[in-house]
Image (cartoon, rainbow, N blue to C red):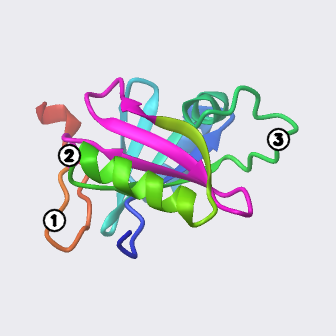
């Protein structure tokens, strides 16, 4: 696994309130399907409903599970890379919380928890191309 984080997703209680907060700080985002994407240097910050984020990572109930509302994402170049990284994480002691599979956005992803319970999503998203150095650029959704 390369040493990088592609996306940081914050599970939020009120998407509109959170978007307004970040825009008040001068950050600009794009909302697509009840999800706000913000370019933050060479990575992306994503705002998404907390319960939806928990379910997407294989947690049926975020309450009482220790779910902190944050998921780190490591994007890769292929579905094969997703499978290989999830297998390597499991061998290293991670707990698979969501097996790899097709996503609603046309990609392929799975999730694991590290030994302290921090959640990682390993994803291949053809709509979020990676530069040679692994940095991610959020596309202009207005031009799609």
- Residue bounds of the magenta highlight: 100-128
Residue 25 in view of the camera: no
Q: Position of residue 78 (x, y in %)?
A: 22, 48
From the image, tell me which residue sits under label 2: 139
Disc nearest the viewer among 1 and 3: 3
From the image, tell me which residue sits under label 3: 65
Badge 1: residue crowd in 10 Å (few <14, some 14–19, many ≥20): few
Residue 79 in view of the camera: yes
Q: Secondary structure at mark 3?
A: loop
Q: Is residue 100 left or right of residue 19?
A: left
What residue is shown at x 20% (from left), y 59% (from top)?
130
Q: Secondary structure at mark 1?
A: loop
Residue 107 forms part of the magenta stretch? yes
Classify 2 as above or below 26: below
Q: CA distance from mark 1 to mark 3?
A: 36 Å
Q: Position of residue 73 (x, y in %)?
A: 45, 54
Classify 59 as above or below 10: above
Q: CA distance from mark 1 to mark 2?
A: 13 Å
Disc nearest the viewer among 1 and 2: 1
Q: Secondary structure at mark 2?
A: loop
Q: CA distance from mark 2 to mark 3?
A: 33 Å
In the depicted view, which residue is nearer to us: 93 or 11?
93
Image-quadrant location for residue 17? top right
Determine whether label 1 and label 2 are within 8 Å by CB: no
In the depicted view, which residue is nearer to us: 35 or 118?
118
């Amino acid at each position: 696994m390369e040493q990088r984080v592609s996306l940081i997703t914050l599970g939020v209680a009120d998407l509109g309130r959170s978007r307004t907060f970040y825009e008040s700080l001068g950050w600009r985002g794009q909302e697509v399907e009840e999800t706000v994407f913000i370019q933050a240097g060479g990575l992306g910050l994503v705002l998404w409903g907390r319960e939806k984020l928990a379910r997407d990572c294989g947690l049926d109930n975020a309450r009482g599970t220790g779910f902190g509302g944050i998921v780190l994402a490591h994007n890769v170049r292929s579905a094969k890379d997703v499978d290989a990284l999830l297998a390597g994480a499991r061998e290293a002691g991670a707990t698979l919380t969501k097996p790899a599979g097709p996503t609603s956005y046309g990609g392929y992803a799975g999730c694991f928890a590290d030994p302290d319970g921090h959640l990682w999503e390993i994803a291949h998203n053809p709509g979020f191309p990676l530069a040679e150095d692994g940095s991610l650029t959020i596309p202009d959704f207005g031009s799609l």
